[in-house]
Amino acid sequence: MAVSQVAQLPSVSDRRVWRTLDHYVDQAHAQEDFSTVTSAGPDETASRRGRNAQRALYACEGRKARVVAQFADVLEAHGACAGNSCAVCVGMSASYQAGVCEHLPWAAITFDEFHVIQLVNRAIDAVRRQEVKRAPERRRTRYIWLKDKHAWRIQKTLRELFHSAQSAAQAELLLDRWYSWARRLPPGADQGGGQDA
């Protein structure tokens, strides 16, 4: 429910509702204990896309390296040692990566599934563009390529890899296999395979 709608219920101003919210949110945030936090996943757009975070620790605007610095400070202020953060899952923003390297240097960086699949979609589109240059009659086929069985199988297999790997070593092995398999197949091929191929 919007703040303006809440304000109409007791017949108070939006401003008063916001002040009340700010007071109680600040009070609750001051009591937070982050001493058990070992991994984090900064995502500037998760809430807009409807993704549910397991636990929101910190919210701010921007996606610069300084946001990671602020987050590291908040961790420390709430009982967590930033050194405990052993894993950080981020998008592929260079500024996030730089911020993690500078302010959480001991944390292993993992790229989130959404951004990795986005890269695969871009690669499929790049192959499509090359095919259009070679054969102009294939112009205006982007949607067909993205829904192609082969392209779909590449994406599906990569998504499965994200959920099946039990360790970093296993993920690396599976990713190497997936990459070799995906590169061998010609555009539009409808061949079986995947991690096991």
Image: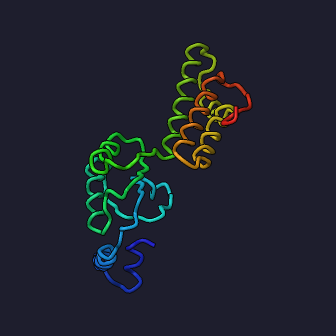
Quarter location, residue 60: bottom left
Identify the residue at image location x=51%, y=39%. 118
Q: Is residue 154 left or right of residue 92?
A: right
Question: How far across and down, in percent of the image, does residue 44 sit?
Answer: 39, 53
Q: Position of residue 128 (x, y in %)?
A: 58, 24
Q: Is residue 29 above or below residue 193?
A: below
Front in this rendered view, residue 125 or 67: 67
Image quadrant assignment for residue 135: top right
- 112, 87: nearer the viewer: 87
**Residue under the image location 26 percent in, 53 percent down:** 69
| Residue at the bottom extreme of this rendering | 10
Q: Residue 18: in sight, yes or no?
A: no
Q: Looking at this view, is 162 or 106 the one in front?
A: 106
Image quadrant in which you'd find residue 110: top left
Quadrant where the image shows the C terminus: top right
Q: Measuring 42% from the left and 71% from the top, which residue is drawn there?
A: 2
Residue at point 58%, 13% (across, down):
134
User: x%, y% of residue 89?
Assistant: 43, 50
Q: Is residue 89 something one can see in this rendering?
A: yes
- Residue reaching furthest to the front: 169
Q: Is residue 128 above or below residue 82?
A: above
